[in-house]
Image (spheres, coloured by chain):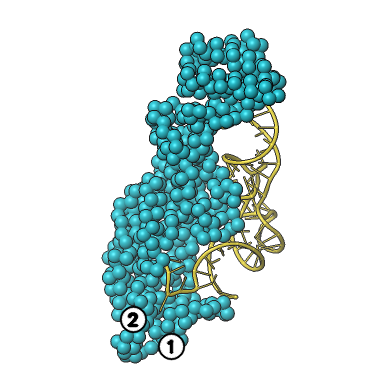
Amino acid sequence: MPDPNSSRAAAPRVRFAPSPTGFLHVGSARTFIFNWLYARHNHGTMVLRLDDTDVERNTDASVQSIFEGLRWLGLDWDEEYKQSERLDLHRRSAEAVFAKGLAYRDFTPAHATDDDHSSSQGAWLCNPGMRDLSREESDRRAAAGEPFALRYRVPRGEHSVLRFTDAVYGQQTKPADEVEDFALLRSDGMPTYHLASCVDDADLRISHIIRGQDHLTNTFKHLLIFEGLGAAPPQFAHLPLLVAPDGAKLSKRKHGPVVSVTTYRDAGFLPQAFINFLCLLGWSPKNDREFMPLDEIRELFTLEGVNRANAVVNFTDADPFDPKAVWLNAEHIRALPVEELSRDLEPFFTAAGFTPKPEKIEAVAPLIRERIKLLRDAVAAADFFFLDQLPAYDPAELIPKNGDASLAHRVLETALEVLAGTNFDHDSLDQALRSAATQLGLKAGQAFQPIRVAVCGRKNAPPLFETMVVLGRDVCLDRIRQAEAKLAALGANA
RNA sequence: GGCGCUAUCGUCUAGGGGUUAGGACGUGAGAUUCUCAAUCUUAAAACCCGGGUUCGAUUCCCGGUAGCGCUACCA
């Protein structure tokens, strides 16, 4: 018999138990993260258990997708189980409950009661006649091969009250009389979610069940199962749900890929940013900290910081990502050492058809890190560094404000001369180009625009000198000459 | 229908019997800068409604309303 005091002090064992019926979605990811944080904060054990008892809906692809998502998050776990490999235990446990008289066979054909027995008046509690079937008749019909579901015999008329203290929602009570005789075994002999989940939680000695609030009312059934199993119930902590802007629970069917973890990954979220964002949905460190590295989150994480109201993930049709998630991602990108950022950027460049050398990416990364919010933005922000030939651009952009084509031409001519004889380092370029601007009687901004557009192919780009250093003299001179040609063509057409 | 949970700026949240109700994202304005970003300053923006308790409620209690969840031989 475990001593409640010592078990409180013992290292917690938590589990994440997804059912593989689709891709890993953000709500599940957050549940995983909260479990992980609790385990790691308290030096406990993290268990991953695939709740795959619903053979109809489980797919291999889904299992792969879940692992893929979890691997990307980069959070580890200590033990791994598959519910489908534990069916014997589930059935034996069901039999034990039945042997104690805490369950009974229900021979009502499946789906015979699933009309709207609940919508009329009051809740459905059990199928007539079945609960009170004599043991002899029950045995006889079972022996005759008649299919049955095994139902829990919920205490009736004893005024017994089920109660537990949720770490988030506090004291919860419910009269047993209001709980229906839920199924433990389906008529095909497969365990239901409730049974399998509780049997495994008991067997794996899970100490804290941290899961979505949609299970809050199911917990009373689970309490009954634990009791039937002769096991002490674990601590419960229910998490507020993640909902869409319309208030509806995030769903794969209704909201599509925006709820899939891989969508964030593919767009170029950093896992630590994604985790940071998800943590702030339904939990607060209560010290006004928002941008936090994983270590700090783990340090600060407690169940007391979890709140009770559902949290909206603020996406729209136009923008699938919550602006705060995007901002956090930008913050994390800026916090990354250049080498790491470069490594993270590489696959995005590759996917776009560029094959820059690592050194080149490391040279470019510092120039774009403050200009991108998602890793994939880097492709558009830095393409001109990797392209042999600049994409077509409007030659009119070469002409600075308050200037004309001939002014632009003069600037480019001067730049050509100056650059031919200047060292390609930041300070030399700075000095040379600024004094050239002064000689032309132009402000820096005016003088640099034609050069920037010539060299980058657009008006908005990273700082000019750094950019030119990375590009190198040959490329710069070549692109400026091409710009002059465009300018000439523009003049000829006019 | 029954049962349950929840309710602070547009969103995420802090707070709590007496506060200028705090922070962040986003939005507006300005500063800075070679453009864009980044950065800095700044503005607008909230306690669901009604009763109670109280000298005083946004905070505590009750009711309403709304949203969500559960009410399956899904998980």
How far, Cα to Cα, is label 2 from label 1? 16 Å
Residue A360 in sight from this viewpoint: yes
Q: Residue at x 35, y 85 (%)?
A: A146
Instruction: Looking at the picture, tell me which residue is in the foreground, A58 or A6.
Output: A58
Q: Give the labeled residue for mark 2.
A: A101
Q: Position of residue A206 (x, y in %)?
A: 34, 60
Up-down relation of residue A223 to residue A114 (above or below) = above
CB atoms at circles 2 and 1 under 8 Å apart? Answer: no
Residue at disc 2, secondary structure: loop
Up-down relation of residue A334 to residue A16 (above or below) = above
Circle 2 residues within 10 Å: few <14, some 14–19, many ≥20: few
Q: Quadrant of the N terminus of chain A?
A: bottom left
Q: Are marks 2 and 1 on the same chain?
A: yes
**Please, which residue is most extreme toward the front here?**
A492
In the rendering, what colour is chain B? yellow
Q: Quadrant of residue A63?
A: bottom left
Instruction: Looking at the picture, tell me which residue is in the foreground, A218 or B34.
Output: B34
Q: Which mark is residue A129?
A: 1
Q: Residue at x 59, y 19 (%)?
A: A484
Question: Which chain, by letter, is cyan?
Answer: A
Q: Which mark is residue A253?
A: none
| Image side of residue A388 versus residue A70, left or right | right
Q: Amino acid at mark 1?
A: Gly
Q: Residue at x 50, y 23 (%)?
A: A467
Residue at disc 1, secondary structure: loop
